[in-house]
Image (cartoon, helix red, strand yellow):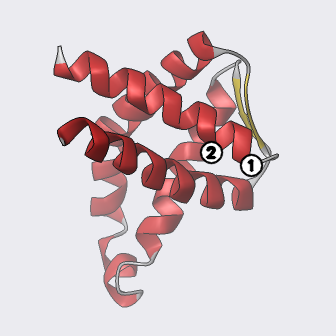
Amino acid sequence: MMLLLVWILNAVALLVVAYILPGITVASFGSALIAALVLGLLNTVIKPLLILLTLPLTIVTLGLFLLVLNALVFWFAGSILKGFQVDGFWWAVIGAIVYSLVSTALAGLLAS
């Protein structure tokens, strides 16, 4: 039940990001649900492999390269989904940051 609620909150966070940032579009709530699911799967499966492969670069940049990895995963999700679009790399960087902030805030509301 909790996983379902977190999934819905992440979809709402995507809708908030699309509302705030003009370079990111989400067609509907259904598209946001699918995008949140795909982002969750990519962050669970692909992102740890990318972190492992880029560990030296992440260490040299004191962890700042993780922002680039977050943006690349966010941008990739926008490129493979039809109802979720990210208009470029810098929109992906900003979108990934705002998405993580909003989803963390929503999860914090859920926890309290």
Task: Examine the rendered structure and indicate whether residue 88 appears above or below residue 60.
Answer: above
Mark 2, secondary structure of its residue: helix
| Quadrant of the rendered image containing residue 66 | bottom left
Q: Give residue 90's position: percent from left, percent from top.
A: 72, 62
Tell which tag, 1 or 2, sits nearer the viewer.
1
- Label 1 is placed on what type of residue? Leu
- Label 2 is placed on what type of residue? Trp
In the image, 38 versus 57, the foreground residue is: 38
Mark 2 — residue?
A: 75
Precedes in sequence: disc 1 or disc 2:
1
Residue drawn where x is 30% and y is 50% of the image: 49
| Quadrant of the rendered image containing residue 87 | top right
Work out which quarter of the rendered image holds the C terminus and state it: top left
Q: How packed is label 2: few (under 14 Cα within 10 Å), some, or many (20 or more)?
A: many
Mark 1 — residue?
A: 21
Report whether 78 appears left or right of 14.
right
Q: How packed is label 1: few (under 14 Cα within 10 Å), some, or many (20 or more)?
A: some
Q: Give residue 110's position: percent from left, percent from top.
A: 25, 35
Residue drawn where x is 49% and y is 26% of the image: 11
Task: Examine the rendered structure and indicate whether residue 14 appears above or below residue 71.
Answer: above
How many marks do you count on the picture? 2
Residue drawn where x is 29% and y is 21% of the image: 5
Q: Give residue 61's position: percent from left, percent from top.
A: 42, 86
Task: Examine the rendered structure and indicate whether residue 82 appears above or below residue 69.
Answer: above
In the image, 108 versus 38, the foreground residue is: 108
Q: Give residue 24's position: percent from left, percent from top.
A: 74, 41
Mark 1, secondary structure of its residue: loop
